[in-house]
Amino acid sequence: MNERLAAELELLRTVYPDAELRDDLWARIPAYPLPKEIWSRTSCEVAFRFVLPGQPPYAFWVRPPLRLASGTMPQNYTDGVETGFGPGWGQFSWSAEEWLPGADVHRGANMLRWAQSFALRLAEGA
């Protein structure tokens, strides 16, 4: 694991202590909180790809696949996707509004801010 990835993982674990990294590529947060009034459950696993600073990240994956509290499938979402953590994931299409990482992992865009941005999409519901 290179220094940047190690620093990104260390920073991610300041908020998500159980976060893990597989093959320097896939990150997983075992219990990501969900707004209970929107979703059919209160938490789920979340996976996402770890990227190098010059590459903007795209998408995040949830397991088990999610449904809104009404029972319907959310928009911009696909079930039955495989990740570096195996099969049985749902994928949300999601991209960073701005991806300008700094030389220091604590400045600018980073994997922690990316993971925290999922809450914005999950708060949207539909």
Image (tube, grey):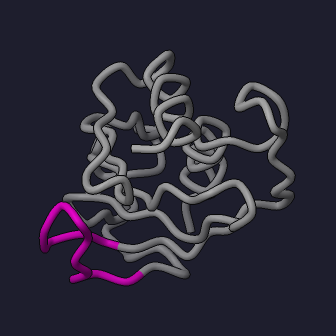
Residue shown at the point (33%, 39%) measured from the top left: 29
**On screen, residue 12 above or below 88:** above
Q: Position of residue 17 (x, y in %)?
A: 35, 19
Residue 51 left/right relative to 28 = right
The secondary structure that dominates the magenta segment is: strand
Judged left or right of residue 24, residue 52 is right
The C terminus, quarter of image:
bottom right
Q: Residue 14 or 52: which is nearer the viewer?
A: 52
Q: Residue at x 31, y 72 (%)?
A: 90
88 in the magenta segment: yes
Q: Residue furthest front?
A: 2
Front residue of this view, candidates 91 and 26: 26
In the foreground, 125 or 94 = 94
Tell me: residue 116, above or below residue 70: above
- Left or right of residue 66: residue 10: right
**In the rendering, at what x and y percent does residue 113 appear?**
67, 38
Quadrant, the N terminus: top left
Q: Quadrant of residue 98?
A: bottom right
The residue under the point 55% across, 29% down is 7
Which span of residues is magenta-colored?
78-90
- Could you tell me which residue is drawn at 40 percent across and 34 percent down? 33
Residue 87 left/right relative to 34 = left
Residue 59 x, y percent position in the rendering: 53, 70
Q: Is residue 83 above or below residue 78?
A: above
Looking at the image, is 105 positioned above or below residue 77?
Answer: above
Q: Considering depth in this image, is 37 or 82 the residue closer to the camera?
A: 82
11 drawn magenta: no
